[in-house]
Image (cartoon, helix red, strand yellow):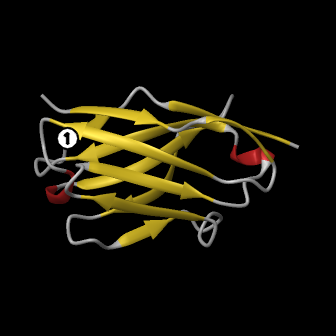
Amino acid sequence: QVQLVESGGGLVQAGESLRLSCAASGTAVSVNTMGWYRQAPGKERELVARITRGGSTSYALSLKGRFTISRDNAKNTVYLQMNSLKPEDTAVYYCNLRDSWGADHWGKGTLVTVSS
């Protein structure tokens, strides 16, 4: 059974950085497409960043340059480095794994709050 556990969220001030972690079990992050999504209050969940099994990365256009997705295969963990945070980055951040059958698996999310 696939399980994803996010950590690293918290309260920061605008301009600061955070690194989110997503620890996976039940499968290897290296053989699946992994992603970070976020959902702000009153808004739909949106894709933040994605990394494929081949290591290719993609980002929401508005976030490219500030956020970086990476993975550590030995730790079976995916990271999201977030720099120069803005109040509009406030959201619950979710880790996603899309397996080889196209099924999506989700973590419970971690809250990031950016104060101005």
Q: Is residue 27 above or below residue 111?
A: below
Q: Is residue 116 left or right of residue 74?
A: right
Crowding around mark 1 (Cα neighbors within 10 Å: few <14, some 14 to 19, many 20+) is few
Residue 80: image x %, image y %?
Answer: 48, 54
Quarter location, residue 65: bottom right
> Toward the viewer: 113 or 96?
113
**Three-letter amino acid code of the residue under disc 1:** Ala
> Toward the viewer: 100 or 80?
80
Residue 38: image x %, image y %?
Answer: 54, 42
Q: Residue at x 69, y 47 (%)?
A: 89
Residue 84: image x %, image y %?
Answer: 73, 60
Residue at the disc numbered 1: 103
> Toward the viewer: 45 or 69?
69
Q: Is residue 8 above or below residue 15?
A: above
Q: Residue at x 21, y 58 (%)?
A: 73
Q: Secondary structure at mark 1?
A: loop
